[in-house]
Image (cartoon, grey):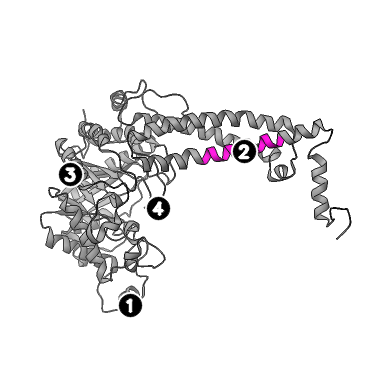
């Protein structure tokens, strides 16, 4: 089998645990497969799933992992030859910290909880405490990821504005604070190598990057999740003159929209193919091309809803790990991985429009099947709710005045009732499938967002249609035409300013 440019490098699988951690039993099933597929480690983003203590205890989510569970995850990874690299955001994406009143004073913008103020003396102290606690449960980790991406609010508070306006300052706020974090790491943990997302570095000049002194303190992880990579033309030239080592970050899920539920495997294959091509051209510019991190975002930020659950993205993860090893996507690879996952036919690379039952068998495959069912049910739901019949014969006006043509309302009611029943059955299926992987909090959230919300609208539609038909039927039995032109006349009279007794107002 051919080998890709990163075949002998590390492939880290990103586990985004924000607010929805899998049960440990799922890791017991998954980790051996990750090893088999060529993964060399995990990039674990705990966020509020970490059991912070002391002053930081408030950061814990109710369903966080206990300390003993963290140790079990680390041990299980080690048993499967997977290194564990913890990720702690240290600048942006700190909603889970800054949402609390206790740490509100650290915000760069008082209204927004995303980024901390780099000049607040407490910022570095709190970040240091978070790092200390996480590393205390990961003593054998050689790498540590400090985050650093998407710092949207910087230089906004009065203190930071003054810093930027000081002509005597040969410093830039982002690089200044990031440098402080990295120096802290170097002093306290000289045996750890730091990694950071690169997006906030991309538009810095070569002079700025060199002057910051971070080149010997961190390894940038260059991320881009699109099918066609869009990066500054000189990025590799600049980075290679500053950083001896570099990483690349791809995406196997979670990159096509914050509300997306099904992974478009074809999209992510193109992303990995693009990165394999780039890696073959730029790897030799650096002393060390470390390898890849395959990211799999579960929420776009702390407050966002869940997107693309991990189990339904396993086919994408498996295929893309193989692509990084082989250096290409071939039919032989496609067929072999599909068979490994128990598919009777090669896995569909674009699931949208795939409404037929799927046969497959891998950890969490019941959730994968359930998401395919959701695509079908959602398509049927949209066809009913957004249909011309509903818009034309059950508009707000029709409902208000019971303007009812039974033949059309009955045509709405029949498929709506069938879909209501299908969603009720689907709810039972998904509650069981999700409970095999996730804790009750996650099950409740997902079911609420993707089943109960639609059931609620369907129930409302059905109740309204049935009420309209009852009123229409009673009117016909009494020899009165319900709704119709009478309702139209009533509305017209109100508009023209008549009272109930017919007199003008």
Residue interval drawn in magenta: 453-468
Q: Say which mark, if any, is on residue 162.
A: 1
Residue at image location 55% in from the left, 35% down from the top: 381
Q: CA distance from mark 1 to mark 2?
A: 58 Å
For disc 3, the marked residue is 71
- Give the mark nearest the N terminus, 2 or 3: 3
Residue 367 appears in the figure: no
Q: CA distance from mark 3 to mark 4?
A: 27 Å
- Whether 455 is among the magenta residues is yes
Q: Residues within 10 Å of mark 2 (few under 14, many from 20)?
A: many
- Where is residue 183 drawn, in percent x and y? 16, 64
Above/below status of 193 relative to 214: above
* Relative horizontal placement of residue 190, taking residue 495 as reference (left or right): left
For disc 4, the marked residue is 303
The label nearer to you, 3 versus 4, is: 3
Q: Secondary structure at mark 1?
A: helix
Choose between 478 and 356: the one closer to the eye: 478
Residue at image location 37% in from the left, 52% down from the top: 301
For disc 2, the marked residue is 461
Q: CA distance from mark 1 to mark 3?
A: 45 Å
- Give the mark nearest the N terminus, 1 or 4: 1
Q: CA distance from mark 2 to mark 4?
A: 30 Å
- Where is residue 6 drawn, in percent x and y? 21, 40
- Where is residue 365 drawn, in percent x and y? 35, 29
The label nearer to you, 1 versus 4, is: 4
- Give the mark nearest the N terminus, 3 or 4: 3
């Amino acid at each position: 089998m051919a080998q890709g440019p990163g075949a002998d490098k590390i492939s880290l699988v990103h586990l985004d645990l924000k607010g929805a951690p899998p049960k440990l039993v799922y890791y017991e099933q998954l980790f051996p497969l990750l090893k088999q597929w060529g993964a060399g480690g995990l990039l674990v983003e705990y966020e509020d799933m970490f059991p912070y203590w002391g002053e930081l205890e408030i950061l814990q989510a109710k369903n966080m992992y206990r300390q003993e569970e963290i140790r079990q995850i680390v041990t299980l990874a080690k048993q499967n030859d997977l290194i564990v690299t913890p990720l702690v955001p240290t600048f942006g994406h700190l909603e889970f910290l800054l949402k609390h009143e206790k740490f509100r004073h650290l915000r760069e913008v008082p209204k927004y909880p995303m980024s901390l103020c780099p000049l607040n003396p407490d910022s570095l102290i709190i970040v240091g405490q978070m790092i200390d606690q996480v590393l205390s449960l990961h003593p054998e980790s050689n790498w540590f990821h400090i985050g650093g991406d998407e710092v949207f609010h910087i230089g906004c508070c009065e203190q930071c504005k003054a810093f930027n306006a000081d002509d005597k300052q040969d410093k830039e706020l982002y690089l200044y604070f990031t440098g402080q974090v990295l120096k802290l790491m170097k002093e306290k943990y000289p045996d750890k190598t730091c990694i950071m997302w690169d997006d906030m570095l991309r538009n810095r000049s070569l002079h700025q990057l060199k002057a910051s002194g971070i080149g010997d303190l961190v390894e940038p992880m260059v991320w881009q999740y699109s099918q066609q990579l869009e990066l500054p033309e000189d990025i590799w030239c600049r980075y290679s003159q500053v950083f001896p080592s570099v990483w690349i970050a791809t995406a196997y899920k979670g990159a096509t929209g914050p509300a997306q539920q099904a992974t478009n495997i074809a999209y992510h294959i193109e992303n990995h193919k693009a990165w394999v091509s780039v890696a073959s051209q730029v790897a030799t510019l650096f002393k060390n091309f470390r390898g890849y991190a395959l990211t799999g975002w579960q929420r776009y930020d702390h407050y966002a809803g869940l997107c693309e659950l991990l189990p339904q993205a396993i086919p994408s993860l498996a295929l893309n790990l193989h692509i990084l090893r082989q250096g290409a996507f071939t039919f032989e690879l496609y067929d072999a991985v599909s068979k490994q996952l128990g598919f009777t036919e090669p896995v569909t690379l674009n699931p949208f429009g795939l409404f037929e039952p799927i046969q497959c068998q891998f950890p969490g495959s019941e959730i994968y099947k359930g998401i395919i069912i959701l695509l079908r049910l959602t398509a049927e739901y949209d066809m009913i709710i957004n249909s011309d019949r509903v818009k034309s014969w059950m508009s707000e006006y029709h409902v208000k005045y019971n303007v009812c043509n039974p033949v059309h309302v009955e045509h709405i009611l029949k498929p709506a009732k069938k879909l209501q029943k299908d969603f009720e059955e689907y709810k039972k299926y998904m509650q069981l499938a999700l409970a095999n992987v996730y804790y009750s909090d996650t099950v409740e959230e997902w079911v609420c967002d993707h089943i109960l919300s639609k059931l609620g609208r369907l129930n409302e539609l059905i109740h309204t249609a049935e009420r309209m038909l009852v009123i229409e039927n009673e009117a016909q039995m009494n020899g009165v035409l319900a709704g119709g032109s009478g309702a139209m006349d009533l509305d017209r009279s109100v508009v023209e300013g008549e009272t109930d007794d017919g007199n003008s107002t």
